[in-house]
Image (tube, rainbow, N blue to C red):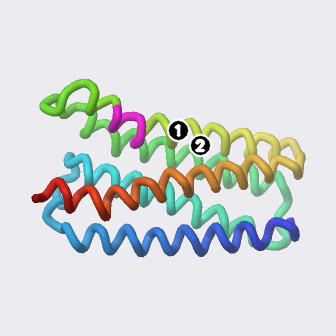
């Protein structure tokens, strides 16, 4: 894991930075985020979940003496919690019918489908680690990078687009 330490440290730091951006975005538009059925509130919660998984797993992978099986179990548990939480966040938003089908599909893509695809990719890394394959950390790293990109897009939209819609 020594070669991966810089990656996981950078990943944890980047996730923490984006969490800060997320908190700034929510503070700027507190009224918008008060309603949990609001799509912006759902996007903020989804992004926080993604960043929390990224941050926690990155820090966990920095722990020096853990074997691949334990790492695989923790990744699998994190994926299960993240998928469950993503579905809970997505469900109230998808039930809102006033915005139309296209809007619901776009919300479903960013809140549920894309994160779940990346979580399944992360799960392939967990299965590899459970089997003792230490190269499966490449899947974990790739999935964390993908989660970071999704959360970066979401955080940017929360900072810029909420302001545009409120006017």
Q: Quadrant of the N terminus?
A: bottom right
From the top left corner, tell me how far across and down residue 68 is, in percent: 84, 55
Residue 121 in sight here: yes
Displayed quadrant of residue 100: top left
In the image, is 84 to the left or to the right of 63? left
The dominant secondary structure in magenta is helix
Q: Residues within 10 Å of mark 1 (few under 14, many from 20)?
A: many
Q: Is residue 46 magenta?
A: no
Relative to 81, say whether 65 is above or below.
Answer: below
Residue drawn at (17%, 59%) of the image: 32
Q: Which residues make up the magenta segment?
A: 106-111
Q: Quadrant of the C terminus?
A: bottom left
* Label 1 to label 2: alpha-carbon separation: 5 Å
Secondary element type, mark 2: helix
Q: Residues within 10 Å of mark 2 (few under 14, many from 20)?
A: many
In the image, is 70 to the left or to the right of 44? right
Residues at circles 1 and 2 in contact by the CB criterion of under 8 Å:
yes
From the top left corner, tell me how far across and down residue 65 is, in percent: 85, 70
From the image, tell me which residue sits under label 2: 119
From the image, tell me which residue sits under label 1: 116
Relative to 89, say whether 13 is above or below.
Answer: below
From the top left corner, tell me how far across and down residue 156 is, in percent: 39, 60
Of all residues shown, which one is farthest toward the top? 101
Residue drawn at (20%, 46%) of the image: 37
């Amino acid at each position: 894991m020594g070669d991966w330490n810089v990656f996981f440290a950078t990943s944890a730091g980047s996730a923490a930075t984006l969490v800060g951006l997320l908190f700034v975005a929510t503070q700027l538009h507190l009224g918008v985020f008060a309603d949990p059925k609001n799509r912006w509130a759902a996007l903020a919660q989804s992004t926080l979940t993604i960043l929390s998984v990224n941050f926690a797993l990155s820090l966990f992978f920095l722990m020096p003496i853990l074997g691949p099986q334990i790492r695989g179990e923790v990744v699998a548990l994190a994926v299960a919690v993240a998928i469950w939480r993503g579905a809970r966040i997505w469900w109230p938003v998808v039930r809102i019918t006033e915005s139309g089908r296209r809007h619901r599909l776009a919300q479903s893509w960013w809140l549920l489908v894309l994160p779940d695809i990346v979580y399944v990719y992360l799960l392939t890394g967990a299965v590899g680690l459970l089997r003792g394959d230490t190269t499966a950390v490449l899947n974990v790293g790739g999935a964390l990078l993908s989660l970071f990109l999704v959360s970066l897009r979401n955080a940017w939209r929360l900072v810029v687009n909420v302001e545009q819609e409120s006017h």
